[in-house]
Amino acid sequence: MSHKQDKAAKRKAKLKARKAHAELHRLHLAGRVAGALMDLCADVLPEYVDDSKGPDLVGRNILWRMGMVAWNLAVTGRKEIDDSSIDEMRVDAESKKMVRDEINGLVRRKYEKFPELRTAIKDVAAVIVAGEARVKVSLGDTFPAMPIPEFYDKPEPLTPEQILTKRKGLGLSQVKFAAALGVSVKKVSAWEHGKDTPTEAEMEKIKDITAGI
């Protein structure tokens, strides 16, 4: 092999090694982002998923797509939700406002929990891995870090006593109150005993149905 051919072979080997390293880094990052997205959506997962007949991939796909929209808003610093991304979730018109509220809450959580992850998500898919439902992500571009915005309009959380008072003010049992809010009775009980707090979207629902109390 000539000296020229030797140098060309070394360059090719270095390029191949760099590509392999970049691919490994990309796979590692995709795993981190997937784990972070699942964590981001974990608190609201029970509201969208019904595993009574096996892993509910449809519900997870809807929720994780909402998480993807929120993630990309936080990463890119955009202020408005793209309507087409909500349309892709195939939810009815009545559910769209709830979805928007949920996404806004997830945007804030992304800023708080994962500010260091700046790579956008191109697509998500719910898959079964070793018998468990997991999210597979396709990565998009990486963006420079941006300052976390001030969320001045963040509502104060409702206390257990306030939730109990509002429910009793409507004359509703926990079962009927939960049905009116579209949540589980277990969740209402947890709120009233201080074991959990409503999400921002849930607080808005409570305020809507208890207005005037």
Image (tube, grey):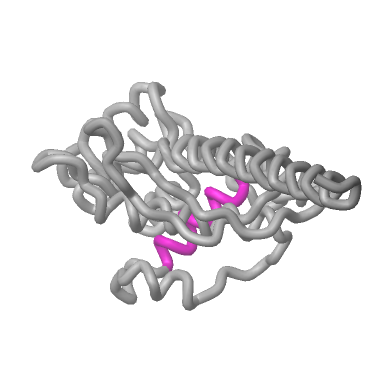
Front residue of 207/126: it is 126
**Relative side of 184 to 143, left or right:** left
Q: Tell me residue 135's x, y (percent).
A: 40, 45
Residue ID at (58%, 53%) = 71
**Relative side of 19 to 211, left or right:** right
Residue ID at (22%, 33%) = 131
Rendering quarter of residue 165: top left
From the viewer's perspective, is residue 17 above or below residue 81? above
Residue ID at (40%, 61%) = 98
In magenta stretch: residue 93? no
Residue ID at (62%, 47%) = 108
The answer to whether one can see residue 24 in this image is yes
Rendering quarter of residue 134: top left
**Relative side of 40 to 113, left or right:** left
Rendering quarter of residue 1: top right
Residue at the right extreme, as displayed: 3
Residue at the front extreme, as displayed: 1
The answer to whether one can see residue 115 in this image is no
Front residue of 188/83: it is 83
Q: Tell me residue 163's x, y (percent).
A: 38, 37
Front residue of 148/202: it is 148
How many numbered marks have been drawn onto this rendered protein structure?
0
Q: Tell me residue 94's x, y (percent).
A: 32, 72
In magenta stretch: residue 101? yes
* Magenta span dominant secondary structure: helix
Residue at the left extreme, as displayed: 53
Q: Which stretch is magenta?
A: 97-110
Q: Tell me residue 30's x, y (percent).
A: 55, 43
